[in-house]
Image (tube, helix red, strand yellow):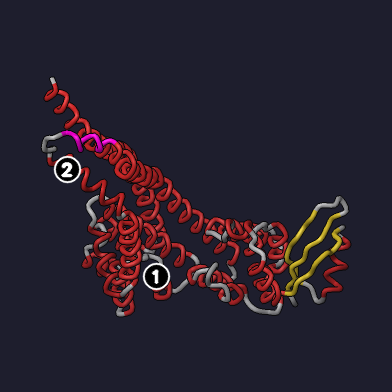
Amino acid sequence: MPIYAYRGITKEGKKVKGIRDADSIRLLKQALQKEGIYITEILEEAKIDEISKKEVDLKRIFRRIGGVDIALVTRQLATLLKAGIPLVEALSAIIEQVDNPELKTVLTKVKERVNEGSSLADALSNHPKYFSELYVNMVNAGEQSGTLEGVLERLAYFLESQSALKNKVISALAYPVFMAIVGSIIVWIMLVVVVPKVTRIFETFGRELPWYTRLLITTSNFLKDYWWLVLLIIVLMIFGFSYWKKTPKGRVIWDRFKLKMPIFGPIIRMIAISRFAKTLSTLLSSGVPIMKAMDITKKVLINVELERVVEEARMSVREGESIAEPLKRSGKFDPIVVRMIAIGERSGQLEEMLENVANAYESQVEAKISTLTSLLEPIMIVLMGGVVGAITFSILSPLLQMNQFVQ
């Protein structure tokens, strides 16, 4: 069934647009007319991308499909299926109320594949940009076991918790980063604009300036004359670092360094362990085989060093060994985490133990980030005040000496 994008006008004169699937343009027009919409333009799926290249839709730019959007759709689908509504009708109901045009298009294509006889997992797998391997495998396990509604509920909870944790980290670091940017701009303006004007008076001083004042003037003159070179070096360093970080060797070194960083390292490791436990628990609870579940979990850690540890654990499980033992040997997982996983394996409650680990570590991460934020704010203020104070002292000190000399 083809997919069409349409634009029209309601009886009240309001402009509307949307995406619908229909057997033909004629049937689409008839369906929309029954809803009180008079068509002004219809585009077939093949032409939608061509038009979108010519017309920049700001709504589409600023409303990308995020984890929260996918989580909301997943929860809505679980609710509708639990109420006994057939899958195709449930997808149609969700499509009608989705505002994001990009998500509406994706869901329409998924519904079309399901309507043709494809499984939901297969239909979702055609859109890996929006539905991860974890998502597809969980849906597949739910369809095969006949527990799709429950799997979707667990999946929605998982996506919501991961998005919440990510937002907490971003929110906690937003203010310190903002302060650092504002502070750098203020110092730059002082050195390039203020300092040259004030230090002109030193040309008639007739005495040797203190070393720190000479250093300030030299720095100011360099930034004033070669500001473009400084910006170029900064940009090249950023691009160079980004390129190096993506190389196999660079990624390994950088990921190891992140885990060993003095303040942020423990937090990064705790976030990774929480993600490992939450993901593996969700997959196992949904009926995904343990080997496949560990392979998927390995990919969501986003750290080569920890991925290697999980891969070693996966190979050990294949050879009949427990999960806990290789994690313990690696030294990357806390002893309490290893012990809880070992108890879960022996008692047959591995999913529950992993869920407990994830919840505990999420709470610890939130507490540590809150503490770190409360410390970073005064540190940033002191640093900014120190730099501005040093610049002010370097300017005022020679002026005070000149005043004493005149007296």
Q: Earlier in the sequence, mark 2 or mark 1?
A: 2
The residue positioned 13% from the left and 35% from the top of the image is 206
Question: Is 191 above or below relative to 84?
Answer: above
Residue 9 shows up from this direction? yes
User: Split into 4 quadrants, where in the image is the N terminus?
Assistant: bottom right
How would you rate the neighbour count of disc 2 (Cα within 10 Å): few for under 14, some for 14-19, many for 20 or more?
Answer: some
Indicate the secondary structure of the residue bearing disc 2: helix
Question: Given contact means CB atoms under 8 Å apart, are the residues at marks 2 and 1 in contact?
Answer: no
Percent coordinates x, y for residue 239 in the rendering = 35, 66
Q: Between 59 and 101, which is closer to the camera in this rendering? A: 59
Residue 376 shows up from this direction? no
Percent coordinates x, y for residue 117 in the rendering = 68, 79
Give the mark toward the camera: 2 or 1: 2
Q: Between 234 and 163, which is closer to the camera in this rendering? A: 234
Task: Say whether residue 292 is left or right of residue 325.
Answer: right
The stretch in magenta equals 198-205
Residue on which the image places disc 1: 299
Q: Which of the 4 image quarters holds residue 37?
A: bottom right
Magenta segment: does it hold 350? no
Alpha carbon separation for disc pair 2 and 1: 53 Å
Label annotation for residue 214: 2
Task: Say whether residue 157 is left or right of residue 262.
Answer: right
Percent coordinates x, y for residue 367 in the rendering = 35, 43
Characterize the magenta stretch by its predominant secondary structure: helix
User: Split into 4 quadrants, where in the image is the C terminus?
Assistant: top left
In the image, farthest residue toward the top: 407
Residue type at tag 1 = Lys
Percent coordinates x, y for residue 235 in the rendering = 35, 61
Residue type at tag 2 = Arg
The residue positioned 21% from the left and 43% from the top of the image is 216
Q: Which of the 4 image quarters holds residue 345?
A: bottom left
Magenta segment: does it hold 199? yes
